[in-house]
Amino acid sequence: MAVLELEDISKQYGAITALTNISLTLEAGQVVGLVGDNGAGKTTLVKIIAGNFHPTSGHIRLNGEPVSLHGPKDARSKGIEIVYQDLALADNLTAAANIFLGRELTLTARTPEEAERPWYRRRRWWLPVPEILDYRGMYKRAGELFMELKSETRPRDLVRRMSGGQRQAVAIARTRLSNPRIVLMDEPTAAISVRQVAEVLSLIRRLRDQGIAIILISHRIPDVFAVCDRLVVLRRGEKVADKNVADSSPEEVTGLITGAIERA
Amino acid sequence: MTTDLSLEKAIGQRTHSGFVAWLVSRQIFWVLLAAVLSVIAMSLLTSTFATPNNLFNVTRNFAFVAIVGIGMTAVIITGGIDLSVGSTVLISAMTTTVIMHAGLPITIAFPAAIAASLTVGAINGVLIAIAGMPAFVVTLGMMSIARSIGMVMSNNALIYEFGPDQAILFAIGGGSVRVFGLPIPNPVIVMVLLTAITAFLFNWTRWGRHLFAIGGNEKAAILTGVPVRAVKVSVYMFVSFCAGLTGFLMVGWLGSVTTGLGSGMELTVIAATVIGGANLAGGSGTALGAVVGAGLIEIIRNSLTLLGISTFWQGTFVGGFIVLAVAFDRLRNTETSE
């Protein structure tokens, strides 16, 4: 069954049309590459799925249920996690601190789900007790997540001292905290060295192997072909192709992006 | 079993290779070393430094700067600044003075002084965090507004009568407690308690974690659901609380209040926190650092006086230490980025 279904999604900003009737389905354990030139509508589409924007028209269904997303926090609580292009990491904190940022485990909130609730629903008693951090619990869970991702990153390391690949691992491990069903990745291979790209691509495969549906936005066609099962091409707000990677070629995709090939 | 073992190992791995390496990489260690060396040198060079009386004065003098510095550290960790602390000290002192001069008890004056200070902090915080105005400009404006309100409250009269609870007020701000036979000034006791509480809040609570996250990458903090606005309002209220506490203690110590109280204090406080290792760009700082920084400044000041060197040289020394502290921070960061 499809994890995520988009039906006839359109988005207008005043007189400007950013997206026209986009329909898209996403299956569990599938990596879908979303490609297109600057201004093709990739970011708008992702922001709609992430809950940042409301579509002007169209429907979103999660596991067959129609949903309306109100902001990134709401999307996160419905199982949609986002890896931002700049990774949204605080350099001055450790890997574990970054993974748990905004949902730190404390003595009163032992799980990330509990930590995400508003503080007044987390209290066991009505006293202004400071929420004391559960360092042990966070280091342990972070270590397990890096283990699952087969990453060399250590929970106590400062993000400032990490390579681009390790930073990606931290950002990806963060999405695993809440057992998401969908992970959106915005240009994960754009700002890192060639050697680290392979590391990141294998992280994406590990996520997929755990049955997570992934949308990968990328400018780098070779990366899309290396890791994606399907690819979707956007041009000027329209979907011009949606096909299995095996049935396509980098040349065709480039043609579709630039408009040399009308549709496929 | 093997996976468990390697997991334990991975979790247990520390960034720092050893205790000595960790220690020498800390700015606070070098500042503390400088302070300790000056104390030793002064004790050997002069007969006036290591007297109980002088040490009592030195510790009490720096306690006031240190208490505000602890609050300032919280603000600086989030990447902000508060220039209005000196004026907040005056507001708190004036509130205490006016209420007690009117014959009301200290049990009303103290909460009122703290409430007045927290109001200043809340206004700063709301304008910065919610209206999105730059902290420098907001607190610069507040520095002027709060001082002027303090002047209006006093009507420029020198007040030295504090009603029925005058003795209690003077005992709190100017008195001392005997610890192991040594008289410890009350402001120093407050400073020590506040340092311990704040260090705990910084390192062991969600609030502390969020301060560092906001200073490190505010956008990331917003995206990950950290209540950035609430935390930012809270730090400006926290520093104002510290300034309010200082103002209240200073009234008791001085026995009178002039409208010049706390003027120029903001720069000494910022200097102390920077010397103690806080980074004005945000993301780092410790409660103890502010205390050690304030201590070093006061030791320099006191030493110059006792050595008979013109107090005009004070600024050169304090300024030199600020530049040195930032240079040290810079050096350390270039090392780690490679």
Image (cartoon, coloured by chain):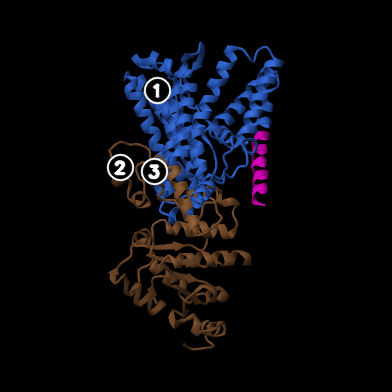
Chain colours: A brown, B blue
What separation in Å lies between label 2 and label 3 (alpha carbons)?
11 Å
Q: Is residue A231 left or right of residue A165?
A: left
Locate residue B311: give its quadrant.
top right
Q: Residue at x 47, y 22 (%)?
A: B189
Whole-number angstrom distance, CA of label 2 to CA of label 1: 40 Å
Q: Which label sits in the foreground, 3 or 1?
A: 3
Residue annotated with mark 1: B97
Q: Secondary structure at mark 1?
A: helix
- Distance from label 3 to label 1 (Cα)? 43 Å
B33 on left or right of B141 = right
Report in which chain the residue with disc 2 lies.
A
Question: Which three-letter amino acid code belongs to the residue tagged 3?
Answer: Thr
Q: Residue at x 52, y 41 (%)?
A: B76
Task: Identify the residue shown where x is 45% and y is 70%.
Answer: A215
Q: Which mark is residue B202?
A: none
Position of residue A72 relative to residue A12, above or below, is: above
Image vertical order of residue B212 relative to residue B97, above or below:
below
Residue at the (60%, 51%) spot, across then down: A161
Q: Amino acid at mark 1?
A: Thr
As drawn, the label of residue A123 is 2
A209 relative position to A162: left or right: left
On residue A106, the disc is 3
Give the chain letter at badge 3: A
- x and y percentages locating residue B74 in the rendered image: 49, 39
Q: What segment carries the magenta color?
A: B319-338
